[in-house]
Image (tube, rainbow, N blue to C red):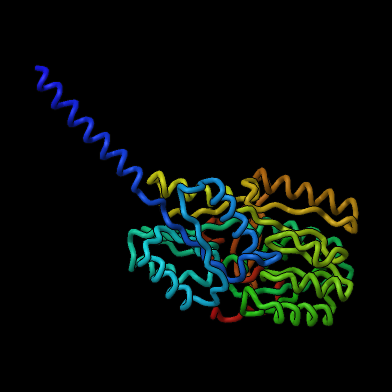
Amino acid sequence: MKRFIYQILSVLFVLTTFSALSAQTTSPPKIAFLYISPADDPTGWTKQHERGRRAASAFFGPKAQLDYFENISDGDAALTLMRELAADGYDMFFATSIIFQNAAINLAFEYPDVKIEVATGFVRTDNLATYSARFYEGRYVHGIIAGMVTKTNKIGYIASLPTPEVMRGINAAFLAARSVNPDVTFEIIWTNSYYNGDREADAARQLIESGADILMQATYTPRPMEVAEELGVYAFGWSSEMREFGPNASLTSTIDHWGPYYIGRIRALIDGRWTPNENVNSMGSNTQIIGRLSEDIPNRVTLLALETIKNLRSNELHPFVGPIRRQDGSGWLAAGETASESDLLTMNFFVEGITSIIPSAQ
């Protein structure tokens, strides 16, 4: 009997020792963040993702290796890099721009065990997820303010690429502006790039010359804000606080906070709970907040903007509720009908009242 107990204890000791050794030798997951621009950008989209990465790195410490790769200019460069990193043992990728989507799809099929997430993407597979926020909610707030502050009734919009996320933002801003000022018009200039300061500055100057007294942007640099400051018009910052680049021009900024999202998704990877979700965060999740409002905004406009923010955060207000028609006059949403998530995630049209032309996707 003693010999039998001794054998059992020996087996348990071996199993316990093996388990402890395995835990000690298991490497932390390797996670790569892909950036379209420099990680130390003073403002904009990449800056906020890098802040989120740093928050996650501080949270997990040695339990996860979080590296970033910057200045990735296009999808081909992204695919080459991702293949190299996957072969080197990286377990997860956060591709922080829609321009990386095709590269991510290719990698997902080539490396089925690797987990990939694409910011503002709209294609998913068994190991490819997408993540975004309801950025159109922030655009809606901008539209309310712009529609009530403009003197020329002309808003200039500097757009990057005609992706669903950009189209949602333009449409939401326009609907909001028209809801408070039926005489508002939008003029849109496409830069065909998310990150090209010279093109953004040129577009800003052209829009101001044509009569726009407020600028919006779906691009990543602060150049439109700088031009607005120089030429004495107003502008909205995007993705991060841009007031320092236009202290007199800035009406407000929308500011992204990605840290909690990255922490949650990396924790799911470590715990074996990661799934290829379509993750869309509302304003109520604090992934996106509205910065300080300019003192130049009249009190009645400030009050309406704050009420709009409150109602968006509580889901009492949705920017896309009918009746809304498409640009060509065809029906889209009936009276009282709310746009579905699938409609929003694949949006490829302007709403009625916008006269600009949608360029072909590159």
Q: Quadrant of residue 6?
A: top left
Report whether residue 328 is seen: no
Q: Position of residue 218 (x, y in %)?
A: 67, 69
Q: Closest to the observer: 31 or 204?
A: 31
- The answer to whether residue 73 is above or below residue 85 is below
Q: Position of residue 147 (x, y in %)?
A: 81, 63
Q: Name the residue located 28 percent from the left edge and 39 percent from the top edge.
A: 19
- The answer to whether residue 129 is above or below residue 74 is above
Q: Name the residue located 72 percent from the left edge and 65 percent from the top edge.
A: 174
Q: Where does the C terminus fall, quadrant-wise? A: bottom right
Q: Name the residue located 66 percent from the left edge and 43 percent from the top edge.
A: 314
Position of residue 280 in the picture relative to residue 90 (left or right): right
Q: Where does the N terminus fall, quadrant-wise? A: top left
Position of residue 40 in the picture relative to residue 98 (left or right): right
- The answer to whether residue 179 is above or below residue 73 is above
Q: Quadrant of residue 198?
A: bottom right
Q: Position of residue 98 (x, y in %)?
A: 53, 68
Q: Closest to the observer: 8 or 170?
A: 8
Q: Name the residue located 80 percent from the left edge and 67 percent from the top edge.
A: 245
Q: Closest to the observer: 28 or 174?
A: 28
Report whether residue 203 is seen: yes
For the image, the number of numbered tags is 0
Q: Quadrant of residue 190?
A: bottom right
Considering every residue shown, the one lying at the far top of the view is 1
Q: Position of residue 225 (x, y in %)?
A: 79, 70
- The answer to whether residue 266 is above or below residue 85 is above
